[in-house]
Image (cartoon, grey):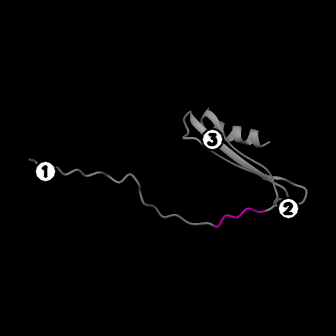
């Protein structure tokens, strides 16, 4: 029986990163703020999107989360913006 040794390279490269505090801020009086996000691998792939709209008091007006079909990242960004508007 032979012994085998297999070296698997680590695909995750360690890098230095900075951390930042991210905090939602209310829009100016009389305005509505729409925050959106989507996910796609870049080339046409199944994609998803979501968003939330709040008024100047921070009250949620509406929120959504949905699959948007086959799209590139850029197409997904445009679709989620259109859906939110």
The disc, 1 or 3, on the residue closer to the chain's N-terminal end is 1
Q: Residue furthest left?
A: 1
Q: Nearer the viewer, residue 18 or 45?
A: 45
User: Gap in Å between the C-alphas at discs 1 and 2?
Assistant: 68 Å
Residue stretch in magenta: 21-25
Q: How crowded is mark 2: few (under 14 residues within 10 Å), some or many (20 or more)?
A: few
Image height of 10 relative to 16, above or below? above
User: Gap in Å between the C-alphas at discs 1 and 3?
Assistant: 47 Å
Q: Do the residues labelled 1 and 3 touch (CB within 8 Å)?
A: no
For mark 1, what is the residue? 3
Q: Which element type, helix, strand or loop, lies under badge 1?
A: loop
For mark 3, what is the residue? 48
28 relative to 10 in the view: left or right:
right
69 relative to 34 in the view: left or right:
left
For mark 2, what is the residue? 57
Give the x, y percent position of residue 80: 70, 41
Image height of 70 relative to 56, above or below? above
Quarter-of-image position of residue 18: bottom right
Q: How crowded is mark 1: few (under 14 residues within 10 Å), some or many (20 or more)?
A: few
Q: Nearer the viewer, residue 72 or 60?
A: 60
Q: Nearer the viewer, residue 15 or 23?
A: 23
Give the x, y percent position of residue 36: 71, 48
Does residue 58 belong to the magenta stretch?
Answer: no
What residue is drawn where x is 60% and y is 38%?
47
What residue is drawn where x is 73% and y is 62%?
24
Magenta span main SS: loop
Q: Which element type, helix, strand or loop, lies under badge 3?
A: strand
User: Gap in Å between the C-alphas at discs 3 and 2?
Assistant: 28 Å
6 relative to 59 in the view: left or right:
left
Name the quarter where the C terminus is drawn: top right
The disc, 3 or 2, on the residue closer to the chain's N-terminal end is 3
Give the x, y percent position of residue 59: 82, 58
């Amino acid at each position: 029986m032979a012994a085998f040794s297999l070296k698997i390279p680590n695909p995750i490269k360690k890098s230095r990163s900075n951390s930042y505090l991210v905090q939602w801020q209310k829009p100016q009086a009389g305005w509505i703020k729409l925050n959106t996000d989507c996910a796609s691998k870049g080339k046409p792939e199944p994609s998803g999107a979501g968003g939330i709209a709040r008024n100047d008091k921070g009250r949620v007006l509406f929120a959504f989360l949905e699959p948007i079909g086959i799209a590139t990242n850029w197409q997904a960004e445009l679709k989620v913006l259109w859906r939110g508007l």
